[in-house]
Image: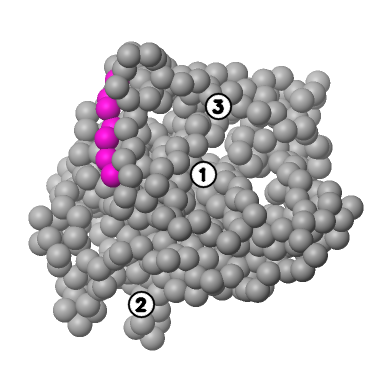
């Protein structure tokens, strides 16, 4: 019998195994993106392969890379057992292309296809993922990176796209534990995995050169884990959050928290010496583990560069806080929470019946999710301030589709633009945005088990 605890998962090393990607059928107008079941070497090589749900045979799926202002055209082909659809997370997209099953499109049934065709207004680091039964489909591997390049290349030596995930694996079988939707996950912190990977590889190892400057595009694809990251042997600056450039680079001096669905772009200089290793560290409860290793194999340049400049800003309409409509969202429920009743299908029901129906969380006292009344109907161009109160005992990563928002600082100033904001237990945060993209936009927790059990609403613009 093989048993493998989390520590051993993290301590065993594995060689990088490249994941294959297939391309489209000849004669079709769009390159295809095929959702299918594939057996992938996810665990270290002495374990068996793991059956995943993948785009084009790998998880992550193929990297989609396009110039700012360019067009993405992909034919989703569904070759697995459930209906699906693809959401382009963080893109200020045409609503019909947002990929939400049951809201912006019909679910794409097995053996059916759907053509996605949209332009990308903003440069930055984005991702795509399944958006039907996301808590299971993303948890089984249906996601990939979507990179939108700036018009002007940056002053860097190279870049790495690094997609972080954690998987819940049964080490005896090397298979994903199939208890998706387990009530404990739904009602607590979500589905937390026991195998941490980067780009589908445990202990990803890369090589680097001394004084080399890299751009790292980090993406958290995990269902529920907040990664706490640090740098060792790398001197770094954060330059963008959720795709959107920061006004000025921020030197990395303390652990960075990357909540599910969030991205951070770093510029890092390799300061470890030749023969040493640099790391992206991931902080556990008591100690730090290496998430990605950079082996410094030779000298790059003799000297370090000057501190990096800010990335060019994306063209974004400024929010006018003084003109803004105030909205509020109260998040309740979960284990150790205060929810005693909630409204389901327009009827107030006691918590027992709510739980019986599979819900554990409510937004403003309702659990109707995608089918319920919207949180708000807004005019196009309306300025909005939304106060979100996390009245629960768990952290939540709130994501708004189709529109980036500012986090509003305590002193009322506008913080960075984001598409996903982390609220710690008991925390209140205000966000502000201009509702300039017409359509029906989901607002939900990106701890995907929470979204599936009540933490979902929408706003309607125009
Ligand atoms: Cu990345 Cu509705 O999600
Ligand atoms: Cu949540």
Pointers 1 and 2 in contact (CB under 8 A)? no
Q: Position of residue 18 (x, y in %)?
A: 66, 28
Is residue 120 found left or right of 248 in the rendered image?
left
Which residue in the protein does label 3 denote? 58
Which residue in the protein does label 2 denote? 414
Q: Position of residue 130 (x, y in %)?
A: 39, 34
Q: Is residue 211 above or below residue 130?
A: below
Question: Is residue 31 among the parts visible in the rendering?
Answer: yes
Between residue 381 and residue 160, name the one nearer to us.
160
Q: Residues within 10 Å of mark 1 (few under 14, many from 20)?
A: many
Looking at the rendered structure, the secondary structure element under dot 1 is loop
Q: Who's the residue at 35% across and 34% down the image?
A: 86
Q: Which mark is residue 188?
A: none
Indicate how the structure is coloured in the image: one colour
**Outermost residue toward the right in this view:** 275
Pointers 3 and 2 in contact (CB under 8 A)? no
Between residue 178 and residue 413, name the one nearer to us.
413
Q: Which mark is residue 221?
A: 1
Of callouts 1 and 2, the N-terminal one: 1
Q: Who's the residue at 26% across and 73% down the image?
A: 318
In this view, the mark in front (3 or 1): 3
Q: Is residue 232 above or below residue 192?
A: below
- Residue 390, quarter of picture: bottom left
Q: Position of residue 264 (x, y in %)?
A: 52, 58
Of callouts 3 and 1, the N-terminal one: 3
């Amino acid at each position: 019998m093989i048993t493998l605890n989390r520590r051993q998962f993290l301590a065993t090393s594995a060689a990088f195994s490249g994941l294959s990607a297939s391309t489209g059928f000849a004669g079709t107008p769009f390159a295809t993106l095929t959702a299918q079941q594939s057996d992938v070497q996810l665990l270290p090589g002495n374990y068996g392969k793991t059956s995943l749900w993948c785009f084009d045979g790998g998880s992550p799926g193929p990297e989609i890379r396009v110039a700012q202002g360019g067009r993405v055209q992909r034919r989703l082909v569904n070759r697995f057992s459930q209906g699906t659809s693809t959401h382009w997370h963080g893109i200020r997209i045409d609503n019909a292309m947002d990929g939400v099953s049951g809201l912006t499109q019909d679910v794409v049934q097995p053996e059916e296809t759907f053509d996605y065709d949209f332009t990308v207004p903003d440069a930055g680091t984005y991702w795509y993922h399944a958006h039907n039964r996301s808590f299971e489909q993303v948890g089984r591997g249906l996601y990939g990176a979507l990179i939108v390049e700036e018009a002007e290349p940056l002053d860097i030596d190279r870049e790495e796209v690094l997609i972080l995930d954690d998987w819940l694996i049964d080490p005896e079988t090397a298979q994903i534990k199939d208890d998706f939707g387990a009530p404990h996950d739904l009602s607590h912190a979500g589905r937390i995995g026991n195998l941490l990977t980067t780009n589908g590889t445990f202990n990803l190892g890369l090589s680097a050169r001394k004084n080399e400057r890299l751009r790292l595009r980090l993406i958290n694809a995990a269902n529920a884990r907040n990664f706490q990251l640090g740098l060792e042997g790398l001197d770094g600056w954060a330059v963008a959050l959720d795709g959107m450039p920061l006004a000025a680079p921020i030197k990395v001096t303390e652990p960075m928290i990357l909540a599910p669905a969030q991205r951070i772009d770093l510029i890092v200089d390799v300061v470890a010496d030749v023969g040493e290793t640099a790391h992206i560290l991931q902080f556990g409860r008591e100690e730090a583990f290496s998430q990605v290793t950079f082996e410094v194999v030779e000298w790059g340049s003799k000297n370090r560069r000057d501190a990096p400049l800010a990335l060019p800003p994306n063209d974004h309409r400024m929010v006018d806080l003084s003109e803004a409509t105030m909205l509020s969202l109260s998040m309740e429920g979960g284990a150790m929470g205060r929810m005693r009743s909630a409204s389901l299908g327009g009827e107030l029901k006691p918590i027992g019946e709510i739980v019986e129906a599979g819900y554990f969380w409510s937004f403003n006292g309702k659990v109707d999710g995608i089918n319920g009344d919207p949180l708000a109907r807004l005019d196009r161009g309306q300025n909005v301030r939304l106060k979100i109160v996390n009245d629960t005992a768990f952290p939540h990563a709130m994501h708004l589709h189709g529109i980036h928002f500012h986090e509003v600082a305590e002193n009322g100033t506008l913080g960075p633009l984001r598409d996903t904001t982390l609220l710690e237990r008991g925390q209140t945060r205000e966000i502000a945005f201009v509702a300039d993209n017409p359509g029906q936009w989901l607002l939900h927790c990106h701890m995907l088990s929470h979204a599936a059990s009540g933490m979902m609403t929408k706003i309607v613009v125009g």
